[in-house]
Image (cartoon, helix red, strand yellow):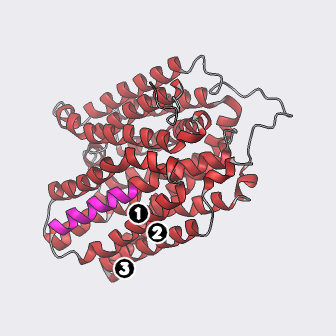
Amino acid sequence: MRDSSRPRLPFEVWALVAGGFTVALGYGVVAPAIPQFALEFGVSYFAASAIVSAFALMRLLSAPLAGWVVGRLGERRTYTIGILIVAGSTGATALAADYAQFVVLRGAGGIGSTMFTVAATALLIKVSPPRARARVASLNAAGFLLGGLLGPVFGGIVASFGLRAPFVFYFVTLLAAAAVVAIALRGSHAAARPSGDPGADDTMTLREALRVPHFRSLLLSVFAFGWSSFGVRVSVIPLLVVAAFNGDAALAAWVLAAYAAGNALLIFPSGRWNDTVGRKPMLVLGSAVLAVGYLVLPASPSVWVVFIVMFAVGAGSALVNPGQQAVLADVLEQRRGGGVVAAYSMTSDLGGVLGPLVAGALVDLAGFGWAFGITAALLLVAMLAWLLVPDSRRLAQP
């Protein structure tokens, strides 16, 4: 007999999770090849790393456009168009003749990436049962995590056919993801194009959302999370491994794998705890674990301590991530809100863009301690913001 306390998830959830896994798998294959492919054009290491920044910057700048498109075309069409833009730019990248073409094509891919990310998040929020919102978020995060872990495994095989091969592989996986979601959601009422009725009251504007204290706390939290987990973790921690422990790229990869392991261990329980215990306890605890982890990391006496700390940081991330999306769903309460979701995505991307730049500059000027100390301070401010608001599950109660 099925447990009535665990609501059955709509088919849209499984379609989007499958699409997300496919996208993450392909990106895991192509990501390591991006800077190496740039070097083939005879550019500097800075120019090679700027390719990643170009993609992130276009994601950031195009977020308002993505929210507007979702409001006009609906989630299914926006998702499909966005993912086809990424597919087209990725396939063209395999044929790029010079560095300038590479930069332009990756930037175009960032626009498409924001479109399908905002559309997928908006639809997941809309179709998630109120008592399973964090469970849906953890399931979606697990799909991306699994794809990201398997991607590099396939990437080593694909790259043996040349540095252009991973882009072809990613092109194919993106087409597969677009086909899966487009076909699966073609009969979905939730994913359909908005009716266009100006009198319809099923859309929350960004101005309305900003009046809700939980949403303001959420923006602060996702900025700190983007800064630390999407920015500093992947850019500064590998530098710490090299500078403090004479490590190489392989050791840095293992350190980041420890984070992934901690994340994988708690991602499913976190979804359940966020739905049963509450969002607030998980967000406060997770933010505290992240802050302490980043604060003590530069003082680690050995690389084994770094492994342990990164495992704990990954676990803290698993507590925070589903809760943040669940709070966004609580604020929207199954209403359309492309602009609201775009602001959420844009704030996270802004943290991911600024984190590596500011932390990298602090490393040069004052050392790793200051870089990780500022990161920990941001996370503690986010924790305080969550302490000052009640649990967002109360928003759904009369």
Along the polypeptide, which appears first: circle 2 or circle 3?
Answer: 3
Please tell me which residue is depicted at 32% across the width and 33% down the height of the picture: 167
Q: Are marks 3 and 1 in contact (CB under 8 Å)?
A: no
Please tell me which residue is depicted at 60% across the width and 45% down the height of the picture: 329
Q: Is residue 256 visible?
A: yes
Q: What residue type is labelled 3?
A: Trp
Q: Residue 379 carries which label?
A: 2
Q: Where does the image place residue 292, in percent across and percent down from the top left?
A: 36, 72
Q: What residue type is labelled 1?
A: Ser
Q: Quadrant of residue 242?
A: bottom left
**Element carrying mark 3:** helix
Q: Where does the image place residue 337, in percent across and percent down from the top left?
A: 68, 42
Q: Which mark is residue 228?
A: 1
- Check the image and report above or below for 172 versus 309: above
Q: Where does the image place residue 322, in percent across and percent down from the top left?
A: 47, 49
Along the polypeptide, which appears first: circle 2 or circle 1?
Answer: 1
* Start-end of magenta stretch: 304-317
Q: Which amino acid does label 2 sit on?
A: Leu
266 on left or right of 40 = right
> Is residue 144 on the magenta stretch?
no
Between the residue at mark 2 and the residue at mark 1, the CA separation in whole angstroms equals 8 Å
How crowded pointer 3 is (Cα within 10 Å; few <14, some 14-19, many 20+) is rated as some
Q: Are marks 2 and 1 in contact (CB under 8 Å)?
A: yes
Q: Which mark is residue 370?
A: 3
Please tell me which residue is depicted at 20% across the width and 37% down the height of the picture: 153
